[in-house]
Amino acid sequence: MDKILVHGGHPLSGSIKVSGSKNSSLPILAATLLTKEPCIVHGVPDLSDTHYMLQILTHLGAQVERASGTVSVTAEKTHSVAPYDVVRKMRASVCVLGPSLGRCKEATVALPGGCVIGDRPIDLHLRGFEALGAAVRVEGGDIKVFAPKLSGAVINMQSKFGPTVLGTDNVMMAAALAEGVTVIEGAAQEPEVVDLATFLNKMGAKIEGAGTRRIIIEGVAALHGAEHRVIPDRIEAGTFLVAGAIAGKGVTVKRVEPEHVRTTTDALASCGYHIDIGDHEISIFPNGAASALELTTAPYPGFPTDMQAQMCALLSISKGTSSVTENVFPQRYMHVAELKRMGAQVQLEGATAVIDGVDCLLGAPVMASDLRASAALVLAGLKADGITEVSRVYHIDRGYEHLDEKLSELGAHIERAKAA
Ligand code: EPU
């Protein structure tokens, strides 16, 4: 298994371009199953998760071609069974359920297994399919959904931790080909949901209200091919901004939608960083010692859970005592034990991390546990004394396009040790 070695203490400067969004690409690629006609998606990042998604589409019968960031998918014929060995590598595989059900009126997808960031149920996705008229069964580890026809309904997608992103996506995709009107109440408002709705509308769907708590979908008989460029990855953008905060002399993140990262730029400004926001780029500059912060994650437009680990790394070396409360995935703190190995002072109190900033972290061998936790360890290593050796780097490769190369472009001393 590859490792990343970060030699701390080398300041970052210059500019970096953000890749296309992982969490937009995955459901948008799944949505290509809704039509027989060719679809072209630009800006798909080169990640193991997007490769897994293309493998699943191929398994389901689609013709897939990939040239750099452009992916063409033609699902002229498709079947609806995605077995465990195809889907187990990625929880987001669950988002083929909605389009398969919409197109084939049945779908069988292996139930995703456990997840290190906490229990990740899909009860709301299934409740949504049932409301559209589908029967749902779990058999031999597979979820089977089937319906002679799908009919529009009013569906609430709100869990006790907030709305569900992929659940909203799944129901929106199935409802696009249902008879009649579907209203999703308590819909997720994430920019990736809006991006999917934009793509579906280009395919001929009739969807209004994406980006608000109520999405209205008027079902159509068929969808056609479409071409689309996915939005920039707001979490990658946020991660580079935090890298600039931790170790930068002045870093500009380009190809970013500033509104999508507003809570991150607000948080960094509250810590004392100087932030310049342009049309599609954001620069961050140090401004004396960074100060402590109280941060709470929440569904969009709140502060993203996917940026929580990176902020913990930053607050570990900020002045004073910070508190970070995780409201979306309350157990998502696998990075804390590893940051402590680097000298961070963090106490977990339920879903809250209380962080006493230290003057400096020390490089250490640490283990990546999930995508964002791994990124946080790399960021911490940028400022730590000595070498931070991050193992299980495949977690990073799931969701960051060439993170080590991009950070090197900014001046980080970072190398990848290939597995023997
Ligand atoms: N939930 C339920 N029931 C459901 C679905 C969700 O109770 O049926 C709960 C979850 O347990 C969680 C909350 O609702 O507490 C929100 O989960 P959500 O369903 O929104 O998560 P997701 O759609 O599975 C996406 C992203 C995650 C991101 C979350 C929250 C993709 C592929 N994944 O997951 O991204 O953390 O939304 O914003 O879009 C990542 O990129 O590192 C990542 C984990």
Image (cartoon, rainbow, N blue to C red):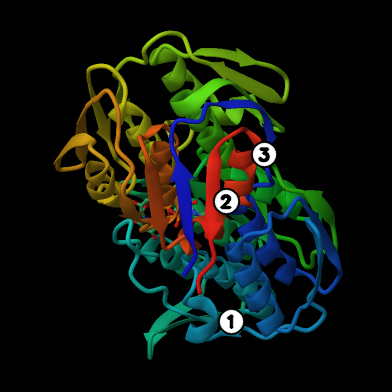
Q: Residues within 10 Å of mark 3 (few under 14, many from 20)?
A: many
| Residue at the spot of label 2 | 400
- Which numbered disc flags the more N-terminal residue, 3 or 2? 3
- Which residue is drawn at the image coordinates 32% and 15% (left, top)? 291
Pick whichever, 26 or 218, lies toward us. 26
Report whether 194 appears left or right of 295.
right
SS of the residue under disc 3:
loop
- The amino acid type, in three-letter code, at marker 1 is Glu
- Which residue is drawn at the image coordinates 73% and 46% (left, top)? 198
Q: Position of residue 384 (x, y in %)?
A: 36, 35
Quarter of the rendering containing residue 258 = top right
- Which residue is drawn at the image coordinates 45% and 36% (left, top)? 382
CA separation in Å, label 3 and label 2: 10 Å
Residues marked 1 and 3 touching at CB (< 8 Å): no
Pick whichever, 345 or 46, lies toward us. 345
Q: Which of labels 2 and 1 is toward the front?
A: 2
Considering every residue shown, the one lying at the far bottom of the view is 140
Quarter of the rendering containing residue 51 = bottom right
Considering every residue shown, the one lying at the far front of the view is 386
- From the Cβ of disc 2, is ligand 1 less than 8 Å away? no
| Residue at the spot of label 1 | 106
Q: Position of residue 36 (x, y in %)?
A: 82, 74
| Residue at the spot of label 3 | 18
On the question of residue 151 being in view, the answer is no
- Which numbered disc flags the more N-terminal residue, 2 or 1? 1
